[in-house]
Image: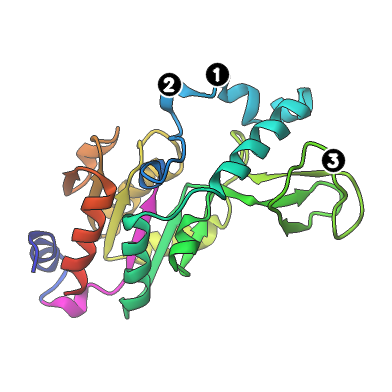
């Protein structure tokens, strides 16, 4: 049994049965090895676009064509990507872990689902979903939005990407907060530690007594807050950690 679990057991209890509730936060780093752009590459630019130009409600109101075209390209690209070994390992953990487990992802791709994970929350929305501003319906969506297709529910040409932009509230926050308060083990994978509220989850879980582990290519901005940090490629770190946990 790995050092992480030994330390967690000494801190939380006396045996494996004391580790029941696990919360895992994933960020762009877990999908980078599948060829999906990391969030803050090139100094905060996505293909030479500033975040303020493509990822805010104000940007959509100012230049909807630019925003829709930007997300149409991303939607097309993620459908060509494939889950990597890190996604597959977390799906295995989801399948095999008998206690409570929740994967909270900041990513808007569907690679966790395609790998087989089911206990999952997309806190920042999903590329493969469209949100109608007229009737509030959300629809699975794989095609372009730039041509203003009608909403399947109401017929209005009012669809936007179902993505949480800067200035908007992340999804399912009540469920997330409950899971954070109740978890025994919190693991952050491939996150920068720069985007709130997710960057504050390590503080929340430590406050309520959880053991905290970071798996990342480089230390995050909040790395010092974790009990343990392991550095390396997600496709190597995550499978090894999962194997040690379920062995």
In the rendered image, residue 199, in percent from the top left (x then y), is placed at: 38, 41
- Look at the numbered discs 3 and 1 and tell me whether their residues touch, using CB distance below 8 Å: no
Identify the residue under disc 2.
42
Picture layout, residue 11 above or below residue 27: below
User: What residue is shown at x 47% (from left), y 47% (from top)?
Assistant: 106
**Disc 1 element:** loop
* Residue topped by disc 1: 48
Q: Is residue 1 left or right of residue 199?
A: left
Of callouts 3 and 1, the N-terminal one: 1
**What residue does disc 3 label?**
148
Discs 1, 2 touching: Cβ within 8 Å: yes
Disc 2 secondary structure class: helix
User: For the view shown, which residue lies furthest in the front direction?
Assistant: 80
Picture layout, residue 24 above or below residue 56: below
Which residue is pictured at 12% across the width and 68% down the height? Answer: 9
Q: Which residues are magenta?
A: 15-26
Is the residue marked by circle 1 packed among few (<14), some (14-19), or many (20+) residues within 10 Å? few
Dot 2 alpha-carbon crowd within 10 angstroms: few under 14, some 14 to 19, many 20 or more: few
Where residue 231 sits: x, y (%)? 18, 42
Residue 205 appearing in the image: yes
Alpha carbon separation for disc pair 3 and 2:
30 Å
Tag 2 or tag 3, which sits nearer the N-term?
A: 2
Q: Is residue 211 left or right of residue 2?
A: right
Query: Image quadrant of residue 198?
Result: top left
Q: Mark 3: which secondary structure?
A: loop
Q: Which mark is residue 247?
A: none
Q: Is residue 32 magenta?
A: no
Camera-side residue of 58 and 38? 38
Residue 119: x %, y % from top left: 46, 69
Above or below, comparing residue 164 to residue 12 in the picture: above
- Tag 3 and tag 2, C-beta contact below 8 Å: no
């Amino acid at each position: 049994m790995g050092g992480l679990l030994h330390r967690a057991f000494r801190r939380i209890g006396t045996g494996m049965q004391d580790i029941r509730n696990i919360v895992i936060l994933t960020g762009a780093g877990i999908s980078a090895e599948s060829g999906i752009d990391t969030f803050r590459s090139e100094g905060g630019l996505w293909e030479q676009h500033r975040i303020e130009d493509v990822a805010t409600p104000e940007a959509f109101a100012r230049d909807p064509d630019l925003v829709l075209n930007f997300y149409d390209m991303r939607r097309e690209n993620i459908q060509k990507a494939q889950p990597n070994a890190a996604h597959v390992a977390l799906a295995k953990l989801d399948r095999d872990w008998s206690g409570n487990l929740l994967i909270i992802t900041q990513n808007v791709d569907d690679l966790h689902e395609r790998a087989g994970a089911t206990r999952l929350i997309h806190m920042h929305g999903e590329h493969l979903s469209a949100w109608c501003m007229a009737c509030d319906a959300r629809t699975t969506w794989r095609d372009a939005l730039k041509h203003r297709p009608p909403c399947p529910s109401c017929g209005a040409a009012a669809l936007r990407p179902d993505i949480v932009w800067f200035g908007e509230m992340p999804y399912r926050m009540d469920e997330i907060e409950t899971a954070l308060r109740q978890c025994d083990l919190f693991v952050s994978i491939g996150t920068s530690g720069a985007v709130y509220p997710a960057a504050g989850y390590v503080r929340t879980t430590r406050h309520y007594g959880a053991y905290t582990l970071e798996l990342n290519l480089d230390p995050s901005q909040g790395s010092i807050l974790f009990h343990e940090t392991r550095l390396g490629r997600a496709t190597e770190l995550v499978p090894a950690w999962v194997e040690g946990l379920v062995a």
